[in-house]
Amino acid sequence: MDFISLTESFSPLQELPPSPLLLHVHEILNSEDTDTKIAMNIADKPDFFSLLLVTTNTKENYWNAHLFYMDQVERNNKQYRYHTFSITESLHLHNCLSELFKG
């Protein structure tokens, strides 16, 4: 996964049309600290659109994933789904479950 700076992360977003989804992504990026690194994957297909935004900040010790998704119906209605995951907490949960189920 290639990470870019917070400033650089706005560049690929310029190719997307204005939308509530894009505004939401900008709100997330604008709330991040300048030390945050970003990885992004955009898939714009005929039957769906998805944007995965991964934010990480080693100084504050966190990794988060933000997933935006639209199928054809949602796209036509200018709606989208949004899920956020703490990768840091997911890794901790994985380690705890691994310890619990060691056998």
Image (cartoon, rainbow, N blue to C red):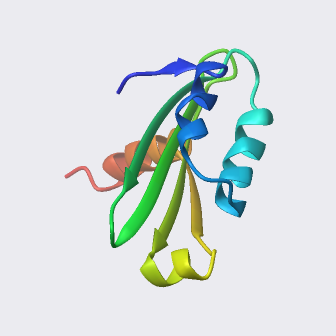
Front in this rendered view, residue 51 or 57: 51
- Residue located at (59% from left, 20% from top): 8
**Residue 93 in the image: above or below residue 46:** above
At x 65%, y 22%, the residue is 6
Residue 86 x %, y %: 57, 46
Q: Residue at x 49, y 70 (%)?
A: 70
Q: Position of residue 53 (x, y in %)?
A: 53, 42
The image shows residue 31 at horizontal and vertical percentages of 80, 36
Q: In this rendering, is residue 72 above or below 81?
A: below
Q: Quadrant of residue 34?
A: top right
Q: Position of residue 3 (x, y in %)?
A: 46, 21
> 99 or 93, which lies in front?
93
For the point 49% across and 84% down, the residue is 73
Quarter holding the N terminus is top left
Q: Nearer the viewer, residue 62 or 27?
A: 27
Query: How many marks do you count on the picture?
Result: 0
Q: Nearer the viewer, residue 61 or 13?
A: 13
Is residue 13 positioned above or below 37 on the image? below
Q: Determine whether 86 is above or below 80 in the image.
A: above
Q: Is residue 100 left or right of residue 70?
A: left
